[in-house]
Amino acid sequence: MEKPKIEDPPPSRSSTWLRWILIVAALVAGGSVALWPPLTFKNLGGSDFASRFSTVMFFSLLIERTVEILMTIWRSEKASQLEDRVRRQVTAGVPANDPAMATAQEALISFKAETMQWTIPVGFALGLLVAALGVRVLNQFVDMPLNTPQEQRWWFNMGDIVFTGALLAGGADPIHKLLDLYRKFVEASASKAAGTKS
């Protein structure tokens, strides 16, 4: 006997409208600034590119460790209490389907989930602060002429702050993967060039 297929629920009308509102708002914002001159990228060598991203990775690691310490100071005591409650019930041989065990496990899982919900906003706030102080990603790769309109310069800096804050809040692992991908690309290009010359 075939199992009935479980169909995904249709998207709500409000979420569909929200997507279209965001798209229209982005088009309106893009149309209002369409006459701004395009920006050009800086001509960077391989070592310059890696060096600039290594600086970003340093600050990302710094924020990651800072958030970890803040969460430990703020929430480790309650987490230890909840873990100890589960550990004592496991040691006492309480079965997994016991209501007391289930309640203790749910409380621990809920507390850890709440901690994770705090981790990203705190990291994002620290990333925004660091970016506002001048550590920015896009500015290192884009050449902005002196005659750039002030409005364009302001919006670019604001976008750079938000983008950099989000990148720093994501931790050092994504940046490390990007650097590793770039290293592999450079090595493959060098090997291909060496093979062509020979």
Image (tube, helix red, strand yellow):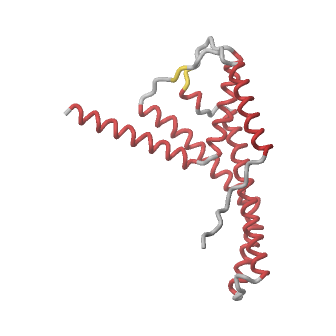
Residue located 79% across and 81% down the image:
100
Q: Quadrant of residue 152?
A: top right
Q: Nearer the viewer, residue 112 or 15?
A: 15
Residue that lies at the very extreme toward the top in this rendered image: 147
Residue that lies at the very extreme toward the left in this rendered image: 198
Residue located 41% across and 33% down the image:
46
Q: Position of residue 47 (x, y in %)?
A: 42, 34
Q: Is residue 98 left or right of residue 34?
A: right
Q: Quadrant of the N terminus?
A: bottom right
Q: Nearer the viewer, residue 22 or 44?
A: 22
- 186 is higher (above) or lower (below) than 154: below
Q: Nearer the viewer, residue 23 or 36?
A: 23
Q: Position of residue 126 (x, y in %)?
A: 70, 43
Q: Quadrant of residue 55?
A: top right
Q: Position of residue 144 (x, y in %)?
A: 58, 19
Q: Quadrant of residue 3?
A: bottom right
Q: Quadrant of the C terminus?
A: top left
Q: Is residue 192 left or right of residue 135?
A: left
Residue located 59% across and 27% down the image:
139
Residue that lies at the very extreme toward the bottom in this rendered image: 93
